[in-house]
Image (tube, helix red, strand yellow):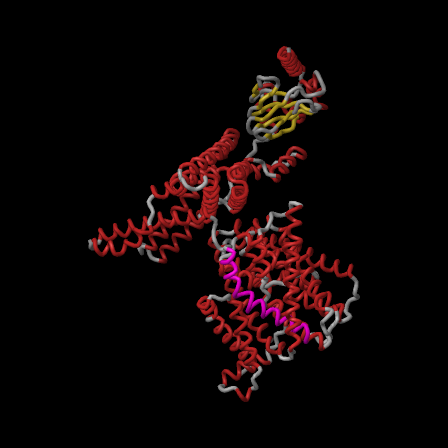
Amino acid sequence: MHQTALTVFTIAGLLGVVSFLPPAAERFAIPDSVLLAVVGIAIGIATQIPAPYLSGGAVRDIVGTLQHFGLGAQSLLYIFLPALLFEAALHVDTRQLGDEVAPVLLLAVIGVLVCTLVVGFALWPIAPVGILACVVLGAIIATTDPSAVVAIFRDIGAPRRLSTLVQGESLFNDAAAIAIYSLAVAIMTGARPAHPGDGILIFCRQFGGGIAVGFAAGWLVMMVMPALRSSRLAEATLTIGFAYATYIVGDHYLHVSGVVAVAAGALAVSAEGRRRLAPSNFESLVTTWEQLAFWASSLIFLFAAMHTPELLLHARPRDLALLAVVVAAALAARALTLYGLIPVLSWVRLARPIGGDYKLFMLWGGIRGAVSLALALAVTQEPSVPPEVRQFVGVLATGFVLFTLLVTGPTMRPLMRLLRLNQAPPAEIALRERVLGLSLATVRNQVEELARAHEIGAEITEEVVAGYRRRARSPADIAEENAQLPAESRTRTALLVLADREQEYCLEYFEGHTVSRKVAAALLSHVARLRDAARSQGIDGYQEAAARLRRFSPWFRLALALHRRIGVAGPLARELTYRFEVQLAARFILKNLTVFNRDQIGPLFGSGPSNALARQLELRLAEIDRAIAALKLQYPRYAHQLGAQYLARTAARFEEQSYRRLRAESIINQDTYEDLLRALRRRRRRGEARTRLDLGLKRQELVRRVPLFAALDDPTRQAVARLLRPRLAVPDEVIVRRGERGDAMYFISSGAVEVRLGERPVQLGSGDFFGEMALLIADRRTADVVALGYCQLLTLAARDLDRLFGAQPALRDHIRAVAAERSAAAVSQAQ
């Protein structure tokens, strides 16, 4: 058989074996990685059997192929590591990782360095090799395996914060370990001079450069993603190419850590993908990567573990004593990091304190896997490394990995149960029981109705529903139990449920094309902030986070500054359009949440939390209504167009749901269904074109609307217009501040402002002007002037005032008369 065919046949056979391992691991309640290691070692032992002793052509061919399989340690990392890192990062909660970035980086960087040095110096006095070989071994065993950690944590149901800490560490500690490992090996073989400063610079360049390259590449991929027009196959293909290209470009061409680059890029894709991709598309992407990671983790474990018998072949009895020192030193280094360095972060307020139960579990739960085995294998395959060092590193690294897989891995589940880390908080348990009780009560009622409809006897019906009747809960029972729980705990949990439901509404609107990708991303970011604030600060934090949606973003303020400084109105128009769309979509969602709070939160948590949430929703809705009303008042035509567009998008979503229902009920055939969807997609593309907002800042039109200038003839009005500059004021903006030096006066073309001078503020509307007193009577502003809504203003600079007055004496006299009246009124009010 051709060698290529033999290789393909061998890999197919390994995949066939792998397919039976997950159910077997579930059957025996052990982690998948443990079983993979055992099977890999068994295959490695089989490859040591001479060919004449093997029976059967297929078995002989497979074993012979594995014996001469030309896949070295470096190849294992290049082929399999990007898939493992990318998939692991997709499951990390990036917002929670941001909250835990300080302890994660300390564990991933300082922790690796501590482990490397502690293990190295603990072995050095008793090892048959030099300090550099001991340091190389310390670096190899300092890296936890992301695939093993993620798989085990998913299986045992670890708490979210614990999962974030350990998964985040496992993503980034590979880079620190590989950097230290590469430098130590290079110094040991004479390829690089031994200089500590050189090592620090290399590590900083690799780690920091990897983060920069990864995030830049991830951001670029997400910018390109909309061009794929929501094709799931194209999106998955792009991310696969991105993962491998980032690893190779970073590692080979830019000389930064490819491991960190892939992890950082995957985190960027994870964070943006959840907001920019349709929910079903992101789920499909995750599923694709889970399949790739399953193949990659399984094969890299098998290939790496297959070399274990070869690495342990020359082990000696004293290696057991050295292995015991390695295990003790690694645990001591881990304890030093967790109990000595992590508390410092809490003391300087860079991180939340980590509980003792979490620290104990993290101390014991550092699983090593295929990456450590591949690095150990790389040392044994490096001809420039002395033979005694190759044996020393290969035996002890392999022994330590086997210890973590065969001793640490199987004991993680019992340890978690012992520490009660897999138990939910009492409020969540109570909520789960109530939801289950109400759900089972609904199931019981449905079964009873079905039995009556089909005339099934009462005895048979009772036999079926008896179990549901015992477990079902009535709303009255739930209300009574609610009263026994602390009100604050119920309210906080209800807020989290409400935030989760708001997120689901955002995703539904995006999936149904009711809102654009950019609007959905903004709303999802806002919901994430709401949830984080509710979790950490309760209802006060929720209220503060809700207020952020009303504020103008930095991009809006930048666009406003561009308009005022250089007269560029395009970015401001786009930001206003975007703000209007976000506010309108948020209003729809808040209306839905009000119903959800009344129908779902109330029965589950009681009237107290439900009423508290209702007040928060009313406040949010009132503020959004105020913001929308301000936009509608200034731009009624655009508001009408946008409302019609949203309604049309919603109608299209209902239409698609109707087609799906008709197809599911076989009322229409597949061809008709696809034709209808194609026509609907064409209409959607036409309807998704963004309605352009005209800011209405054309100078001639604004001048014509001011009564002072309306009576002027066209040439004079044009001359006046050249002296004026259009300006858009936003709601609650302080246009003129009391005490500042006046450099301009303002004419109101449309909108209204409030002059705050004394106890009785004065409102000015279209056709009025303000700011003239600082130019005519004094050099300082005498009052605050605040925009009550969006206002279209005309600004006259102080240097142009004399030119205007010289050309228009009547206008000069009128403005001076009004200024004198206002000055007299201000003096009278002061007295």
Quarter of the image that includes the C terminus:
top right
Between 374 and 248, which is closer to the camera in this rendering?
A: 374
Between 89 and 248, which is closer to the camera in this rendering?
A: 89
Q: Residue furthest bottom?
A: 52
Q: Where is residue 503 in the image (x, y as percent from the top left)?
A: 48, 46
Between 465 and 354, which is closer to the camera in this rendering?
A: 354
Residue 705 visible in image: yes
Residue 708 image-quadrant placement: top right
| Segment tinted magenta in the rendering | 391-419
Q: Using the image, determine if residue 473 lies above or below residue 774.
A: below
Between 680 and 659, which is closer to the camera in this rendering?
A: 659
Residue 252 visible in image: no
Q: Main secondary structure of the magenta part?
A: helix
Q: Is residue 153 left or right of residue 378?
A: left
Tag count = 0
Residue 92 image-quadrant placement: bottom right
Q: Position of residue 68 (x, y in %)?
A: 60, 80
Q: Using the image, determine if residue 826 lies above or below residue 409.
A: above
Residue at image location 22% in from the left, 51% down from the top: 452
Q: Using the image, determine if residue 41 lies above or below residue 257.
A: below
407 magenta-colored: yes
Q: Is residue 542 left or right of residue 723?
A: left
Q: Using the image, determine if residue 768 lies above or below residue 27.
A: above
Q: Where is residue 743 in the image (x, y as percent from the top left)?
A: 70, 24
Q: Where is residue 627 in the image (x, y as percent from the top left)?
A: 52, 32
551 magenta-colored: no
